[in-house]
Amino acid sequence: MTTEAQPSDLYYGDYLQLGRLLGAQAPLSRRQGSEAHDEMLFIIVHQTYELWFRQILHELDAVLQAFSAARLDERRLASICAKLERISVIQHLLVEQISVIETMAPQDFLEFRDLLVPASGFQSLQFRAIEIKLGLREQDRTAFSACAFYQRFKPADARYLRALHTEPSLFDQVDAWLARMPFLQDKHYDFWSSYRNSIEASLSADQQLIKTHPQLSADDKERQLAQLTQTRQQFDCLFLPEAYESQRTQGLVRLSHRAIQAALFIYLYRDEPLLQQPFGLLKLLVEVDEQLTAWRYRHALMVQRMLGRRIGTGGSSGHDYLRTSAERTQIFGDFFNLASYLLPRSKLAPLPAELTRLLDFHFSTLHRDA
Amino acid sequence: MTTEAQPSDLYYGDYLQLGRLLGAQAPLSRRQGSEAHDEMLFIIVHQTYELWFRQILHELDAVLQAFSAARLDERRLASICAKLERISVIQHLLVEQISVIETMAPQDFLEFRDLLVPASGFQSLQFRAIEIKLGLREQDRTAFSACAFYQRFKPADARYLRALHTEPSLFDQVDAWLARMPFLQDKHYDFWSSYRNSIEASLSADQQLIKTHPQLSADDKERQLAQLTQTRQQFDCLFLPEAYESQRTQGLVRLSHRAIQAALFIYLYRDEPLLQQPFGLLKLLVEVDEQLTAWRYRHALMVQRMLGRRIGTGGSSGHDYLRTSAERTQIFGDFFNLASYLLPRSKLAPLPAELTRLLDFHFSTLHRDA
Amino acid sequence: MTTEAQPSDLYYGDYLQLGRLLGAQAPLSRRQGSEAHDEMLFIIVHQTYELWFRQILHELDAVLQAFSAARLDERRLASICAKLERISVIQHLLVEQISVIETMAPQDFLEFRDLLVPASGFQSLQFRAIEIKLGLREQDRTAFSACAFYQRFKPADARYLRALHTEPSLFDQVDAWLARMPFLQDKHYDFWSSYRNSIEASLSADQQLIKTHPQLSADDKERQLAQLTQTRQQFDCLFLPEAYESQRTQGLVRLSHRAIQAALFIYLYRDEPLLQQPFGLLKLLVEVDEQLTAWRYRHALMVQRMLGRRIGTGGSSGHDYLRTSAERTQIFGDFFNLASYLLPRSKLAPLPAELTRLLDFHFSTLHRDA
Amino acid sequence: MTTEAQPSDLYYGDYLQLGRLLGAQAPLSRRQGSEAHDEMLFIIVHQTYELWFRQILHELDAVLQAFSAARLDERRLASICAKLERISVIQHLLVEQISVIETMAPQDFLEFRDLLVPASGFQSLQFRAIEIKLGLREQDRTAFSACAFYQRFKPADARYLRALHTEPSLFDQVDAWLARMPFLQDKHYDFWSSYRNSIEASLSADQQLIKTHPQLSADDKERQLAQLTQTRQQFDCLFLPEAYESQRTQGLVRLSHRAIQAALFIYLYRDEPLLQQPFGLLKLLVEVDEQLTAWRYRHALMVQRMLGRRIGTGGSSGHDYLRTSAERTQIFGDFFNLASYLLPRSKLAPLPAELTRLLDFHFSTLHRDA
């Protein structure tokens, strides 16, 4: 923005509606006649959170819209990644922001805390919308029955949140996009059997090594072979469609079987030019999820510091609830766990030449054509 | 540092022993003939961690020594606080540093991971020493029997750690310092009964309010009275020495009864000039503890991202162990929980004038005297 | 905040006036029919800045009020320091926040930039108020005549800023508080002559060392003696009242002569219990100033990245202006520069016993009395 | 890393050579019989800096090697970007790390400062190597003659640095890579004339608007037309090869004319799939440069705080030197300034269809083929 105000010109404060913005802080303690100095901080901290949530939703909605096209135009992947990266940078700020609240001593909070009951950050509609749009499901809120959850909101807000749950989330859209990923199979190549063979070979080699190792004691061998069996079972859950579906039913994995195959393909062959952007996308989902969890956790510690184990008006310690919920609400956990199934490049079957060519592009090639 | 090297002069690189320092990175993958680019990062990240741990121990040892004096010279409180604050600033950096490791993709880690087995960050002797010197006890390592814990170290290192556990930790020293805090009682004043009276009055007023509230339904009243009973029981555990000791035996609180009284006195009357520095000390202990927990937690997420749920050579998922241990190892949790027992200033009994005078100092007074 | 919404109860969104807050983002590009996605970010970033400025002013006003008492109640120093520390933590966030703007590519900014002319962040009234209340004077804005500066604001806003300049700033108040500091002189002790003697002794010893050093060449001796002369002149400017006033007239120093003496006393004897809090105050002023400068600098780099050297509508490059202004506007620079005049403890004259006693307090002493 | 130490097994401390690493801190003050507590911090801070510099050089060398191939394999762009991003994340940590040094009070530094003369951080060979490998030239060190610069190093180190200056830097390599970028011209399309036409059209439209604007006074028109002339001259310097070379000779721009055209092409058409990665690369160069400058600036402020304007043994204030050098040493400034020449998408000439096709790739297309 640049300079020189003239009577009729656009003015910084008008553009930003600062009159409205800076008139929206009304400490309850002031209205009650004895203002608690720190209530202003409490209000400003929550208001800046809400402004950032608005921005995150702005980005998230654009991402969801891009994914909702009948067929995602892959040209838009870079733009989607830029938006997710912006969300991640904002989240980093939100975690840092907890340090600002922590400049408030518990006793200073007590000066106005009782005035706020029963309002609660729990009721942040935008935060709930972010969770849901990312992919949090009703059943993921283990600390609450759905009913108890919605009761804490105004009826219109509860309806809004319920409705959100019926729309496809980012998780759903990414799952569908992965599931329709090409490349995994054609008449000459089948990624899934190729990968499975590599894994089998690797596990068999390990088994042979243990059995014939001259320095291992019988006990050691037994123990290590038992571990190998466990690892093999873990892979069976990935390879056998029924076993995979059974895990999915139990909530141990969430991605569809087809989607997890595509995700693994991307992780394993991410050096291929055409897979670099998709790999970037999956990495950003993990980062957004990790930051959300980090924020929940830091937030829970801050609440403990501010409130101790004080029994809330709801009969439970806010801190325990928050900490537990930080544990449970990973959305893109399947991508975190992909690391379990990777192979070092040296043990990875090379792609067939024709596929490599398809996944590649060269300026130099183009240059010759152009 | 300033300028102009002359032949025989002190030289930056010599002072810092850079030859030694920068010659201490020997990637195993290089020795095996095919260097994995990212192993250097892995080494440097862990080496910088260890250098910072060395600095933290340098500060911690100075703090412990100051506390170990037969009688802590209170002149040194500012110096102790400065050291704890430095530790906290370093810890903030250690948490940030996790972002650097996260620039390594899981598959790049796989290129050299198997070479490192069975070495583990678990074996960082300095990190263990920090934990123990702060106050972590053997029984706090719930994921392990003490025996299983020590087995992972070289015998000499295990002996060193066992010996550390027999020395007074910072927790112990702070407890003792609080327990001998003056002011809490003299012939005219007894803080503990005064505080207890204020709490009783406050709870009774709440009870009266609920019972006579015209807008509460019978159900509401019943529920709220039940909560009040819970709160009262919580305070009983604080007030009744037997109840308190029983909680302590169960590991629910750790501070001695006398120490928690002094800590509450400091939290409640921290505006008094002589209590400002002690309050600052307790706040810093909470911060150091919070940052340690935050680091453990971010670290556990990073491990999940890097290793997934891969079954480790020890037969258990590293991630699950780390996450659980982040939960369990709060050392100064009692100070976090002090917030449960605070009163707003308006409900706080004023200190007797004579005590206020003792706790106060004024430049202006001095000025008149001087 | 805690839980359970009931019809008539306080609700999170109402308390924070979220309707008002989240309805105050009106991208101009949207009104013009083709919304630029990133204008929302631009608005939100500036709005959160303004909310934080509001909070900083809230703290700053409380600090100014505490200082404005006919005589500062030193009991309030801890509370003043807590407020300055909070400002510093917020500033750290404001610097971090620049990373969020930097997720906007220059070309995306171009999509709506022309719509904003001539509005400018320059016109942030709150930012200007913070500068002025901290102590920035009209003559410190070297890039502008005062007239050109005020012209960019609406007349009422310009009047408001002019009026602010007539009120005592934090710099003024701190100067006055230091100038009336006791301890510096009584019938038995004169800090200023004691300090001056120590400096003289130290410089003479250095001179002797150079002159008699067996390994220094004649050239080296000459050069080092010339430097010593320069150092001596620097101290003369501090010791000789006329020389000091002349420097002050030229704008090379800003503190009154009496105040800089008190500040030095605090820096030198900060281990004394009664000086710990005053030392903390001066340190925080330096931190607040440093963060303000750091923010200006990062901001200037960001503007260069966003606009290049594009000639603004005001005929000058925004970036060059901003970078220059980052250089010139240190407010508490005198405290930064105090480091020039320090002495190591070993060369410091001990305080007379009676003064040490006055500056000290001991729990242990009190214990015996109590 | 995982678990279970056995006698002959790899051990964490051995792998990291901790014996060597943690034995490399030898405070001079300790050797002189009275250890200054904070000298350890001073050593550790500089040692961690040096370890991170080692890592940055590890990444930078890999990047330089990738660029040094006769023809850069564009498959490696993602890997190059990942390395630059890692450098940027490390730099962010290096800036944060300044907060750790700032926990040392100036007077505590004085306790050991004189022992270090004339060693200086100035002599960090690795830092100098990073500067040079990025592209800093001898003539960019405006504060020194080359001779004075090298004199401060041991002869062998000076020779090493001189030799580094003769090798192609990252700046050089990026310039060459841009200069050979295809796409800019073929028989049907010429980017440079197309871009120039768009700029001409835009400037003419602005001129027409000013001349015929009903609300502008004659004065306003004159002033705004003068500005337009200035802008036009700025573009002439870009368009006219002689004017551009003349600017280059004066050091106002550094990129070759061909390279700046390619860079502009990338900035303007970065939405094209094949340009997304190159755009990412240029953005990272700007980030690395910005962080380097930010670090220099924060560092200069810290030095002022620690040393004031104390006259160094070299006869000049360290702080002034550092601050000036922060101003002068932007390496990739031309990319910052590219923003000056951008056009909004709406005023941008569309690419010819054939070129768009070349720059594009679609999974969907591939899908049909596969």
Image (spheres, coloured by chain):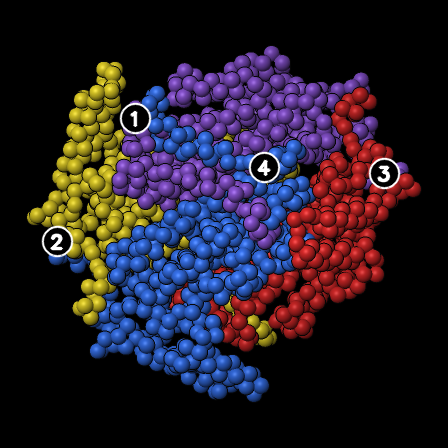
Chain colours: A yellow, B purple, C red, D blue
Amino acid type shown at disc 2: Glu
SS for callout 4: loop
The foreground one among B368 and B71 is: B71
**Looking at the picture, how far across and down is residue B35, in whole percent?**
29, 42
Subunit of label 2: A
The foreground one among B214 and A119 is: A119
User: Residue at left 55%, top 68%?
Assistant: C320
Judge left or right: residue D138 versus residue D220. left
In the rendered image, which residue does mark 3 sit on? Answer: B365
Q: Which mark is residue A354?
A: 2
Subunit of label 1: B
Judge left or right: residue A66 versus residue D117. left
The foreground one among A367 and A25 is: A367
Subunit of label 4: D
In the rendered image, which residue does mark 4 sit on? Answer: D27
Q: Residues within 10 Å of mark 4 (few under 14, many from 20)?
A: many
Q: Let me know if residue B217 appears in the view.
A: no
Q: Residues within 10 Å of mark 2 (few under 14, many from 20)?
A: few
User: Residue at left 40%, top 81%?
Assistant: D242
